[in-house]
Image (spheres, rainbow, N blue to C red):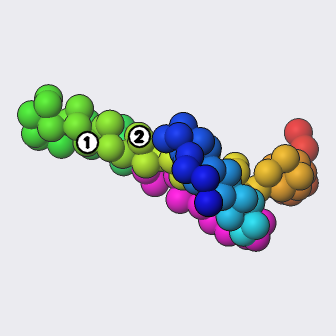
Amino acid sequence: MPSRSPKQAIRHVWHKLKSWLQSLSFRTGVIVLVCCIPFYILSFAQMLLPISTAAKGILWTILFGLAKTCQYEGLTILGVEGYKRLKDKLKRKAPNP
């Protein structure tokens, strides 16, 4: 097997990870997307805690990063077709004014 440059190795791992995420089910993608909601809430709610500003900044960075990670992973799992399917389901459930 020919040796790869670090850049090629990273691309290879990224491609394998993306392929694996896309092979997961629609339901799994929705669950991962829903998981990002508590992280978004916690990332801002922790500002109310009586702790130092530095600790608040660190917590915000970690929680907001987890929220974004869940969001992007969920969208990767869903893909374009899954996103359209989820969007259509949400439109049907919303009451018409």
Q: Callout 1: few (<14), some (14-19), or many (20+) C-alpha neighbours within 10 Å?
A: some
Q: Distance from label 1 to label 2 (Cα)?
A: 8 Å
> Which of the 4 image quadrants contains residue 21?
bottom right
> Dot 1 corresponds to which residue?
59
Q: Position of residue 35 (x, y in %)?
A: 53, 59
**27 in magenta:** yes
Q: Residue at x 75, y 67 (%)?
A: 23
Q: Nearer the viewer, residue 58 or 45?
A: 58
> Which of the 4 image quadrants contains residue 22?
bottom right
Q: Which mark is residue 64?
A: 2
Q: Residue at x 14, y 29 (%)?
A: 53
Q: Residue at x 23, y 37 (%)?
A: 58
In the rendered structure, the answer to whether residue 21 lies left or right of residue 37 reads: right
Residue 14 seen in the current view: no
**29 in magenta:** yes
Name the residue at the top extreme. 53
Q: Main secondary structure of the magenta part?
A: helix
Q: Which mark is residue 31?
A: none
Where disc 2 sits, the SS reads: helix
In the rendered structure, the answer to whether residue 16 lies left or right of residue 62 reads: right
Magenta extent: 25-40
Q: Position of residue 79 (x, y in %)?
A: 79, 51
Name the residue at the front extreme. 2
Q: Residue at x 14, y 31 (%)?
A: 54
Task: Please determine whether, in this image, residue 32 is positioned above or below residue 12.
Answer: below
In the rendered structure, the answer to whether residue 71 lies left or right of residue 88 reads: left
Q: Callout 2: few (<14), some (14-19), or many (20+) C-alpha neighbours within 10 Å?
A: some
Q: Are marks 1 and 2 in contact (CB under 8 Å)?
A: no
Where disc 1 sits, the SS reads: helix
Q: Quadrant of the C terminus?
A: top right
* Labels 1 and 2: the sequence-earlier one: 1
